[in-house]
Amino acid sequence: MKLDPRRFRWAALLGLALAACSAVLVTYSLSGSLAPRLVHTEPSEFAPVLVIDEYGQRCMNFEKIKDRGRQTCFDLSAPEKMVFDYTRMMTSALFVKPDPRNVLMVGLGGATIPLALEKILPDAVIDTVEIDPAVLRVAERYFGYKQGPRQRVFVDDGRAFIEQARREGRTYDMVMLDAFDVDYIPPHLLTREFFQQVHAILSPDGVLVANTFTRSTMYERESATYAAVFGDFFNLRAGNRVIIASRGPLPDDDALKRHAHALAKALEPFGIDVERELQRFSRHRDWSADAAVLTD
């Protein structure tokens, strides 16, 4: 039986057309799943707290679905893995102080760092102070945060909490500052007087860790203010800037490497590559010597 070559040509064209339609449908489906989806809006006296799913991530934001950045995100398929460089940099403060018994976190957000520290430091108590109860409600309902004996939260202003801790003689081995409002860090958490309060509640070799901006009109004055209270500090930069200062002397490079390698296995599930993080530890002063210190 003789076969008509036109049949094969039409069959091939039909197959290509069907494949193209299939590809369009798959692309449409993927693009639909990647578009931001508002999961929840939590009313707040400060700013509405939004929960958004996009690009396979769950994120928290204030006021708007789209703006300059996200407050918190986690990967829905790998919740432990840290999405942002700044959370990895802040956690790498353990290279400076690898065995804190108690940690104070100012600013809860989606609780990425408190939840990680609970697993990395099985004997430590993590206290978090969060000014907005709406953020706490969202963290508990949508981001897996749970309070307990080792994971405590206090609804209060960060500075007021620290000042009260000083009056009561309470100290922390590590204080982590990650408090942002819609625009930037609240001004009363950026002054010399505030950092003096933080310095006072640190244990003798306690460590301050602060998340701030790499590019800011306040960069030089912020830097000068930290230096006025703590002296030299580590200046880590990748997207955001993370400042790591100590009440005692900063460890040398060998000590940093030793602590980092000892923690490597514990940090791996969170996507923290210790070699990459070590490269970010800079002691360089990159601000003007005559920059004015921020005061109350």
Image (cartoon, rainbow, N blue to C red):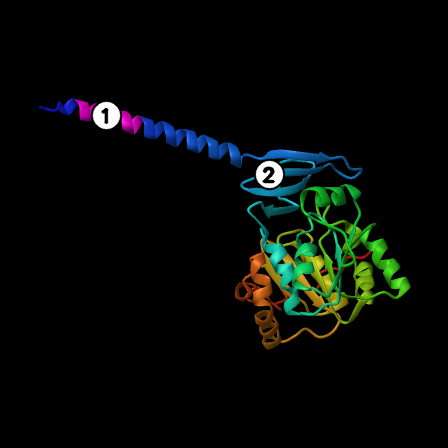
Q: Is residue 108 left or right of residue 15?
A: right
Numbered disc 2: secondary structure: strand
- Residue pictured at 61% horizontal, 62% vertical: 236
Answer whether residue 8 is magenta in the image: yes
Location of residue 110 in the rendering, given as x and y in whole percent from the top left corner: 68, 47
Amino acid type, label 1? Ala
Answer whether residue 52 is magenta in the image: no
- Residue pictured at 59% horizontal, 71% vertical: 262
Image-quadrant location for residue 102: bottom right
Image-quadrant location for residue 15: top left
Numbered disc 1: secondary structure: helix
* Among the two numbered marks 1 and 2 on one chain, the one whose residue lies closer to the N terminus: 1
Could you give the CA–CA distance between mark 1 and mark 2, rounded to whole angstroms? 42 Å
**Looking at the image, can residue 251 be seen?**
yes
Q: Which segment did they paint magenta? A: 7-17
User: Which quadrant is the N terminus positioned in?
Assistant: top left
Which residue occupies the foreground of this view, 215 or 211?
Answer: 211
Residue found at the very far left of the displayed protein? 2
Query: Which dot marks residue 82?
Result: none
Looking at the image, is mark 1 or mark 2 nearer the viewer?
A: 1
**Looking at the image, can residue 288 be seen?**
no
Q: Main secondary structure of the magenta part?
A: helix
Q: Which residue is mark 2?
A: 53
Q: Is residue 92 left or right of residue 188?
A: left
Q: Which residue is mark 1?
A: 11
Amino acid type, label 2? Asp
